[in-house]
Structure formats: C-alpha cells, structure tokens
Image (cartoon, helix red, strand yellow):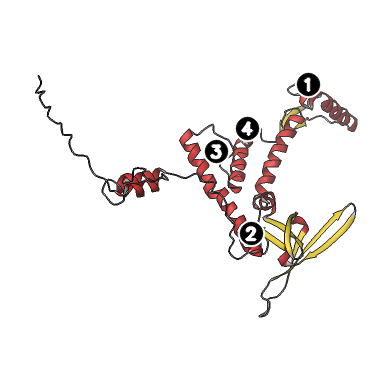
Amino acid sequence: LQSHKKLSGDAFWLKGKTNGVTTSLRSLPPDKVTLELQAPTDKDPTIIKSYKYEDTIDGNKITIVYQPEDIIHFKKPNPNNPFRGLGAVEALADTIDLDNLTTETTKKFFLNGAISNFVLSTDAKVTEEQLRRLKAEMKSNNTGVSNAYKAMILGGGLKPVDISYTNKDMEFLGQLEWYRDKIMYGFGNTKASLGMVDDVNRASFEGSNIGWLRTTIKPDMEAIVNTLNEFLVPEFGENIVLGFCDPVPEDRADDIAEVKDLYPIGIITLDEARDLIDMDPAEDGSGGAFYSSPGPAIQQEETPDESA
C-alpha cells in the first residue's frame, strides 16, 4: 500500500466478497487501474462511475470493470487531479532523473579511463586511415578502468585540447548531496530516520526521529485508517471504529512539569497528580489529600530516667 502511494500516489484494494460480505482484500497495481467518470445528477451525485482494471497475463489481455463500492481507493492529494493521487516519485521525477544522470556520468568517466573529454588538434593534414588507426590505438590503450592514468604518447604534432568541465568544476559531490536531500525531504524522511548520524548528537537525533514519526509516519497511518473507517469498517457494524497505536513516543516532560507546578500550590490532589504521570492511586488512601508543606522538625525532650 505504502509503496504504491509513494510511487504513484494511488493504492487500490479490491474487496473480495462472499454472499455480499467482504471476506478478503486484494491489492491492485495502480498503473493498471483507470477511473471512468460521469456527470453528477441530482439523483446520483457520484462522480466515479467505475474502476477499469486492464492487464496482460500470460499473453492474454484482461479487462475487468469494478463498481465503486468494490474498490477502496487510497490516494495522496493531487492539486491537478482530485480523482487521482500524486506520488513522491512523480513529484520528484526531475530530481531523480538528474541524480541518475549524474551517477551515470561519473560511471562513464571511470569506464572511459578516468580522463575528461578532449579533442586532438594538429596543424598537419590527417588522412582517414590515420584517424581510424589513432581511434583504435586510443581505444585499446587508453580507455577502460584498467587503462586509467596510463601515459598517452601522441605523434604527428597531435595535441589534446580539453573541451569539458572536470568533476571538480562540475561539483558532482555537492550536486549528489543536494539531490539526496531533496529526494529525502520529498519522501518526508530525515537524516536521523535514514541512519545518517555523522553530524548529530543523541539529543538532536532523538528529537529529529520523533519529529519524523509525528510529521510523516503518523499522518500516513491516519490517512490509511480514516479511509478504512469510511469505506470498509461500516460494513461490519455502525458502532465500530478502527484505530492504531500512536507511533510517537509520549513526551512526559510537560506532564511532570505540570505536576510540579500545580500540586505544591494545592490545585490538584495527590491522586490527580499521580494520574497525570500515569501512576496508580496512592495505596494508603491519602490520594485525595492536597499537598501540605512539612513544618520544622520538633524534637521531643528526653524524659529523665527516674529509676536512675
């Protein structure tokens, strides 16, 4: 489900029914599903007429039309099309392409002998035969990783003239880091969530990880659960709600600070204070009492021993 949403912004679940009751769920590839729309009317305000599934299996073309009530459609909001979603990969397509091209360019650089592009210049006339021989010799002796940095000996007045930027001039490393960060943010990730901890301390790592859980993971979980609560759960009863365990760890610092502020000034009782920090009521029954400041210790005078 998440893979489909991240890639295309859409995820489709087909309800498998037995005697009109949903008994199974099947994931449909979003690239095989198209929506058939219709004009809304007063009697039928539904915009989506049906979902058409088209695929080719073992050379056989398959086309199946499903009714809207048979499909659960999960989607990421798409400002250009309210009926289909927009995936992170689609939104970041240009950046991902540039990252791939930069990697491929670096790969070609090493495959071609780790030398930059250049032309050979000479004032002398070069025949076609000489050109073919020169290309063959250069390909044999100076291209490929195994020939990297080998000395190139040229004759006939040939001089290499550089016509491209070097890797240093192109700042490939800086570009790759920029692409990485842009793609990372596009997917809602952080360096901490990806295990990149070279420039963070423990406190900032934990804070970043909690922020990632709060702003990326929890909203995704809420979106899934809300869709199921609307299009699946009502089939099994009107008083049923599907929930999930909150992935964000509880921050007790605020609750502890509140207890320290309210209990000593008598606004809350001992049991109310214990409840704020998820503790059981006091076992000795003193939980209903308010805070009382202990007075100065009173020492009892010693009674002389009369027998002495």
SS of the residue at dot 2? helix
Tag 4: amino acid: Lys
Q: Which one is nearer the viewer's eye here, 285 or 126? A: 285
State the residue position of label 1. Answer: 153
Q: CA distance from mark 4 to mark 1?
A: 25 Å
- The percent coordinates of residue 127 (x first, y second) are 88, 31
Crowding at mark 2 (Cα within 10 Å: few <14, some 14-19, many 20+): some
Mark 4 vs mark 2, foreground winner is: 2
Cα separation between marks 4 and 3 = 29 Å
Residue 42, which numbered label? none
Counting residues from the N terminus, which is met first, the one under dot 4 or under dot 1?
A: 1
**In the rendered image, which residue does mark 4 sit on?**
168
* Residue type at numbered disc 2: Leu
Dividing the picture into quarters, in which one does residue 124 lie?
top right
The residue that disc 2 covers is 228
Residue at numbered disc 3: 192
Give left or right: position of 24 versus 188: right
Side of 273 where 58 appears, left or right = right
Tell me the SS state at disc 4: helix
Residue neighbourhood size for the residue with mark 4, other residues' Cα within 10 Å, grouped as few (<14), some (14–19), many (≥20): few
- Determine the residue positioned at 17% across, 36% down: 296
Cα–Cα span, label 1 and label 2: 71 Å
Question: Where residue 134 appears, x then y in whole percent?
Answer: 85, 27
